[in-house]
Amino acid sequence: MYIKKILQSPISFLLLLLLIITSFVFFFNVFPGEDSSILQVHFIDVGQGDSILIQTPGKQNILIDGGEKNQGAYLQSYLQKQGVKHLHMVIATHPHADHIGGLVQVLANFPTDTVYLPPVTHTTRTFEDLLSTIEQENIPLSPPPSSEPILFEKDLALEFLSPQRDFQDHLNDWSIVLKLTYDNHRFLFTGDIEGAAETALIQDYSRDRLDADVLKVSHHGSSTSSSLSFLEAVSPQVSVISSGKENPYGHPHKETLERLLQFSPNLYRTDLQGTVLINSDGVELWSPLAPLPAAGLDASSGRTLMRFLSEILLKDRIRPLFT
Ligand SMILES: [Zn+2]
């Protein structure tokens, strides 16, 4: 019999075994990247600036900020590599160039359902370019909706927590603050808010509403943000700082790193680690990248052999680092 012949030949037998294993992997979705129940949050390394891509379990793409204008081409290729063909939401947290510059190229190249901007204007060329691109591409523009949670998909909700007040000419404080909840896990994205907006958030919302597992640290780790009372209210398991390598502002500031150390045991920095990916299936939270050693004061000193190995071995594999 033909089958008997196949099984008698060692090479054919091995090939058959390989085929069975491959089919198993394919049909039972062994690889987490192919699991549709996973939320992926990419803190993209755009140098000194912010850009965060959220890919939902329902395959929707949300982009918060886009770095400086000179990051536009890189950002476009990064999104393409992640399979992004369409953006459901683009949120420009506030009109500073290190948040909106790269969005101009993105909005000109990806069909986008809605752009959200805070109700504040700026007179720079970059901001004007952003507005004219939105108009040219005919993209609906919206102020942040009310802070009531929007059920986005099953078990996935978005809340626009700020701005709720008039912060006058303090553009950073006008930043849209967004909370994303996926089942058990909460992410807080704070743009560049500083003291006034942090205090307003503490006054306007209960501790439970501000509490988050993952915090995008405000204003690139500046010492004028991340007050002790704000960090205490959010009490994040994981903090991510988005800043440029050797930037002229000295971000992140040492005082911020020290404050973070008190409330947040796991720290990531894009200036030292590049793009940081955090995954959640609603029950477990993990990253393919190990967090920095204590407070992220120095990345190189903590690079042990174990960490090096874990970064390689854990790449794209499920590891509940912060459940
Ligand atoms: Zn900024």
Image (spheres, rainbow, N blue to C red):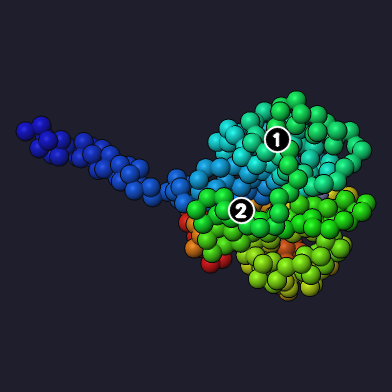
Residue visible at 70% across and 35% down in the picture:
140
Residue 123 sits in quarter: top right
Could you tell me if residue 221 is visible in this image? yes
Image coordinates for residue 97, horizontal then vertical, percent: 84, 41
Instruction: For mark 2, give the secondary structure.
Output: strand
Which one is in front, 105 or 132? 132
In the picture of the structure, the residue carrying the numbered disc 1 is: 140
> How many dots with numbers?
2
Residue visible at 57% across and 50% down in the picture:
152
Q: Is residue 198 left or right of residue 239?
A: right
Q: Is residue 4 left or right of residue 21?
A: left
Residue visible at 58% across and 32% down in the picture:
85
Instruction: For mark 1, give the secondary structure.
Output: loop
For the residue carrying disc 2, how many other residues have a C-alpha within 10 Å: few (<14), some (14-19), or many (20+)?
A: some
Image coordinates for residue 260, horizontal then vertical, percent: 74, 68
Tell which residue pokes out farthest to the left in this image: 1
* Sooner in the amino-acid sequence: mark 2 or mark 1: 1
Q: Amino acid at mark 2?
A: Ile
